[in-house]
Image (cartoon, grey):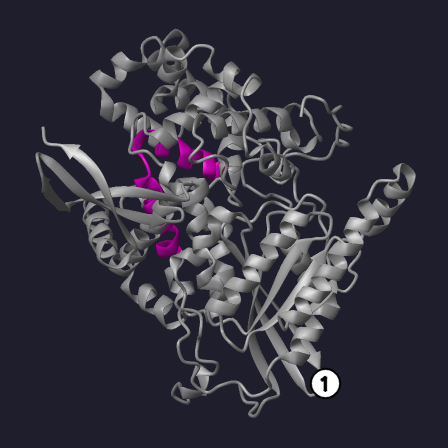
Amino acid sequence: MDDYEPGPVPSPRPLDRFGFVKPELNISPDGLIKGRSACEYEREERRVRKWRKMIGAGGSDWKHYVRRKPHVVRRRIRKGIPDCLRGLVWQLISGSRDLLLMNPGVYEQLVIYETSASELDIIRDISRTFPSHVFFQQRHGPGQRSLYNVLKAYSVFDRDVGYVQGMGFLAGLLLLYMSEEDAFWLLVALLKGAVHAPMEGLYLAFSFVPLPIFVTEVGDGYFRWRWQKWVGLPLVQQYLFQFDHLVREHLPKLGEHFTQEMINPSMYASQWFITVFSYSFPFHLALRIWDVFLYEGVKIVFKVGLALLKYCADDLVKLPFEKLIHALRNFPKDAMDPDTLLPMAYSIKVSKRLEEMKQEYENKNGKTAESAECNEKQKQA
Amino acid sequence: MATTGNKNINSKLVLLGDVGAGKSSLVLRFVKGQFIEFQESTIGAAFFSQTLAVNDATVKFEIWDTAGQERYHSLAPMYYRGAAAAIIVYDISNQASFERAKKWVQELQSQGNPNMVMALAGNKADLVDTRKVAAEANATGFVLQLTCLQEEAQQYAQENGLFFMETSAKTAANVNEIFHEIAKRLPRVQPQNPSGMVLMDRPAERVASASCCS
């Protein structure tokens, strides 16, 4: 990429407050551009001061504060992190700041000296990631360059995952709030599981998991494990399985309607999970979801998905297949208002069932999926 | 629907092919008449529908546009199972995308609906001219390679019972034509009980069986 001259800077067009080109016919695409009253402005100022105090200079007080008052932190994050502090707070709550400090020079090494088998794939997708955002519009401009660097670095850092379509939207969203290197380590924190369970399974071609119930002793203190091969984006498959069940439990009428119309979550929710709502979703809502996602983990994705369906359920149950698919891809504006949707999402409890259904999914697939027996020798401890 | 007989056909169609071959652009051109130079990558799959009038019938295509990357392969069967038609797309300027197209054809032949109407689309046909000019200028083997790919594709299509067209979503060349040709080739009598098809085979006229409220 470095050999290319940057293309022309796109001619100035009206942008929303996040830097996306406004759709021409839409007068108020996100409801946030209407003028703010002085009162709102003051409230925002107070909020930022509170947050600054909580974080300390450069994040110095953060860990101490979280240990002392985790519930206050959670409550404040759920109300939304002030936009001017978002980049810093995201790095603190995701554990990426620690990774960065522990690995000085690693990013530079990955970007400059290593080559990746995915380079062409990444280049092909660069101009197709947030094409309507001003930062990523200029051909070979700073936005496209840093996006390329982060994705290439990750594909080298984890060659099993490499580059997968969808990662660009994660990286792109992060790059709007932090430097390349910071964005890279946040991606690592998420996919490798610095704070929450690792999410690399969203992008893996397959994974092997040992099935302890099939362990047999082959003598001499050696065991034969039975490994199971999970094919294709294994974590996406698991999340969709879990989500399908949650829909049926929380919204039985809608679940029944989906069955009748032959709709399954893969048709509308796979990109919710693969990109954590950063793909074709209103950006202001995506940011609020990410605030909570980075602090509380992936369960917020399930909760928001359920809340969206719940909010629109009365309409959705009346729609036939085609209109239903359309509605599931184009939720109405009022449903997308974070201050309506998120409180609804917080009130839905999913943790326990998610865990149970994960077990169920693993058991089910242990019986049906292709399994591979390996003579993996495991010395008895 | 009130119409009886074979005049109205609902047909599920799936687009398959390599990353960046132009699947989404073909659909967008066909359904909305638009072309976007930097089309956002498709994550998961997208759904569209469009109706065509062909001779004696009206064909409504229910189109699933899939993600191209190999890694997404595991999500594809859901979209091609039970599909009545498929367009396998490759990029005429990219040999690797043609190889990938052949793999899709093989997979559909072994896993898909045996009566599926399959079309092979060599997309980005608008690039031919620019490439020719470039090739003449620097005397590389580009033209030769492209011509070969076209002949190869034609031959491959013939041997495998597909029909082949070079298309351009950018200039709209052959886009309507390819869908039109599929519509013409669709079997006119839909099987009453399509067996062995999963998930997407909605009973065509479930409305008719609903109680007759007015």
Residue A208 in the image: above or below residue A79: below
- What amino acid does circle 1 point to? Asn
Query: Which range of residues does the magenta coloring cover?
Result: A284-311
Picture residue at 51% right of the left edge, 55% below the top: B45
Picture residue at 45% right of the left edge, 31% below the top: A159
Instruction: Identify the image quadrant of residue A265.
Output: bottom left
Measuring from the top left, give residue A279's x and y in whole percent: 51, 43
Mark 1 — residue?
B55
Q: Quadrant of the N terminus of chain A?
A: top right
Binning the other alpha carbons within 10 Å of mark 1 as few (below 14), some (14 to 19) or many (20 upward) gives few
Please indicate whether residue A378 sits to the left or right of residue B182 in the image.
Answer: left
Residue B77 in the image: above or below residue A360: below
Magenta stretch: residue A291 in it? yes
Between B205 and A180, the one nearer to me in the picture: A180
Between A52 and A159, the one nearer to me in the picture: A159
Residue A266 in the image: above or below residue B164: above
Instruction: Identify the image quadrant of residue A79.
Output: top left
The chain ID associated with circle 1 is: B
Picture residue at 47% right of the left edge, 53% below the top: B73
